[in-house]
Image (cartoon, grey):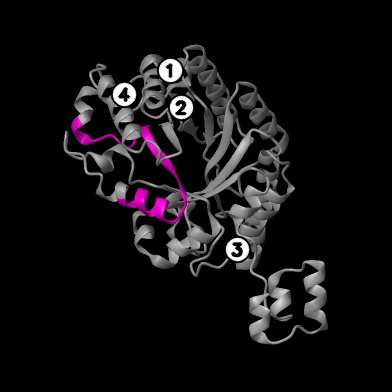
């Protein structure tokens, strides 16, 4: 009311708006644009969360941080918390950058995801000689414990294990052979979860993996392996709370809503929450101008997200990047477009404008049932 008083007495339209409870933008000026509701609010209205992944340079850019704070309720670093980034030299960990991001998240009221406790592609060089014969197992478990303990109460969920299945390796339970040379005993991974739980009893603990989303023989095999691994970990008493499905999608990959929805139901039946943790959509195979490509990306995303959000145990979505130009996909040879045009895989373009993918995400959140 004070704002209206400063502008003068309300006219008939404004008075009617007050009575009917119309948005403030309509009360103050009939022609003023109404800002779209941030994605975090679309998610929150259904009891879910929306997050964004940051590159190290994003944390130094005030415009990017402002966009993230407006749109997301949580963030994750694409690399700052990984082992090779933290401890390049043995017994000389450097938490400077990771701590700074944790402080930034707290100052902006953003939740912080931990990514990742153990990932085969982020192993410090000094550890590699001890991997093959199991001498590194204790160090791996201790690293997971130390990371979770350091950020206890500041990181609300951790990808304890990242990308540990690979059916092509033909190892027990479909476990990945790398970086050990052969699959480790499952006890190592059980111990990682146990150490994480002891270090922070309140953090949600994830098994995070990729390649289970599409309708292909490879993805079908990976879905089977993931289900078997979850069952085995649970049978061994691992405190596994949730499954992270990375959701790196591509418009030229066949997708079946029924197959994916059934798979999510099986995961939910094992007592796991589910989150889409690294979402983006590659448009390599789409011909046409930018508008046509954006429509294809948005349509594919909407079909995928509608199927995912139909499962009540799906609790949120994290986009793997903020702006299109900063996506990891721009550097991948397999993802390059024949016309040389940059990809448009994220909900914001290089200027920070909302893309049609943003609209598709919002619509899928809106169409989901309440959690």
Q: Earlier along the polypeptide chain: callout 4 or callout 2?
A: 4
Foreground label between 2 and 3 = 3
Q: Nearer the viewer, residue 20 or 163?
A: 20
Q: Residues within 10 Å of mark 4 (few under 14, many from 20)?
A: many
Residue range highlighted in magenta: 100-126
Instruction: Let me know if residue 121 is in the magenta part.
Output: yes
Look at the image and tell me whether residue 257 can be seen. yes
Label located before the other in sequence (1 or 4) = 4
Q: Residue at x 44, y 63 (%)?
A: 64
Q: Cβ–Cβ below 8 Å for labels 1 and 4?
A: no
Residue with the mark numbered 2: 166
Most distant residue in the top direction: 235
Mark 1 or 4, which is nearer the eye?
4
**Which comes sooner in the sequence, label 3 or label 1?**
1
Residue for badge 3 = 355
Quarter of the image for residue 214 reads top right
2 and 1 marks in contact (CB < 8 Å): yes
Q: Secondary structure at mark 4?
A: helix
- The residue nearer to you, when weighing 83 against 70, is 70
Question: Mark 2 or mark 1, which has the lower sequence index?
Answer: 2
Residue 261: x percent and y percent? 69, 33
Instruction: Report the front residue among 40 and 23.
Output: 23
How packed mark 1 is, by other alpha carbons closer than 10 Å (few <14, some 14-19, many 20 or more), is some
> In this figure, which residue is indicated by the disc labeled 1?
171
Q: Position of residue 212 (x, y in %)?
A: 57, 33
Looking at the figure, which quarter contains the N terminus? bottom right
């Amino acid at each position: 009311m004070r704002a209206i008083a400063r502008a003068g007495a309300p006219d008939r339209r404004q008075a009617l708006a007050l009575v009917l409870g119309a948005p403030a933008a309509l009360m103050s000026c009939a022609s003023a644009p109404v800002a779209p509701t941030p994605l975090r609010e679309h998610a929150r209205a259904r009891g879910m969360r929306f997050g964004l992944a940051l590159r190290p340079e994003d944390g130094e850019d005030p415009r990017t941080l402002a966009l993230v704070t407006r749109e997301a309720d949580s963030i994750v670093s694409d690399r700052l918390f990984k082992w090779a980034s933290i401890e390049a030299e043995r017994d000389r960990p450097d938490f400077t950058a990771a701590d700074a991001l944790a402080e930034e998240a707290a100052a902006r009221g953003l939740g912080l995801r931990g990514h990742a406790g153990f990932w085969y592609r982020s192993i410090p060089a000094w550890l590699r000689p001890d991997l093959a014969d199991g001498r590194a197992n204790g160090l791996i478990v201790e690293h997971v414990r130390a990371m979770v303990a350091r950020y206890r109460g500041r990181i609300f969920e951790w990808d304890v294990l990242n990308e540990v299945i690979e059916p092509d390796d033909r190892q027990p339970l479909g476990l990945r052979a790398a970086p050990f040379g052969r699959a480790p005993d499952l006890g190592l991974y059980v111990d990682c979860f146990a150490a994480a739980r002891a270090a922070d009893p309140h953090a949600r603990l994830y098994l995070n993996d990729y390649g289970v989303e599409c309708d292909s023989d490879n993805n079908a095999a990976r879905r089977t392996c993931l289900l078997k691994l979850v069952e085995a970990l649970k049978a061994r008493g691992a405190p596994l709370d949730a499954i992270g499905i990375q959701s790196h999608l591509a418009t030229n990959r066949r997708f079946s809503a029924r197959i994916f929805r059934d798979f999510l139901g099986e995961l939910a039946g094992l007592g796991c929450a589910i989150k889409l943790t690294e979402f983006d959509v590659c448009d390599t195979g789409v011909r046409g101008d930018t508008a046509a490509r954006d429509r294809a990306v948005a349509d594919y995303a909407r079909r995928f997200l509608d199927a995912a959000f139909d499962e009540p145990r799906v609790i949120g979505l994290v986009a793997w990047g903020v702006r299109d130009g900063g996506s990891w996909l721009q550097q991948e040879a397999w993802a390059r477009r024949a016309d040389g045009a940059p990809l448009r895989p994220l909900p914001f373009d290089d200027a920070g404008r909302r893309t049609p993918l943003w609209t598709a995400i919002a619509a899928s959140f809106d169409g989901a049932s309440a959690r």
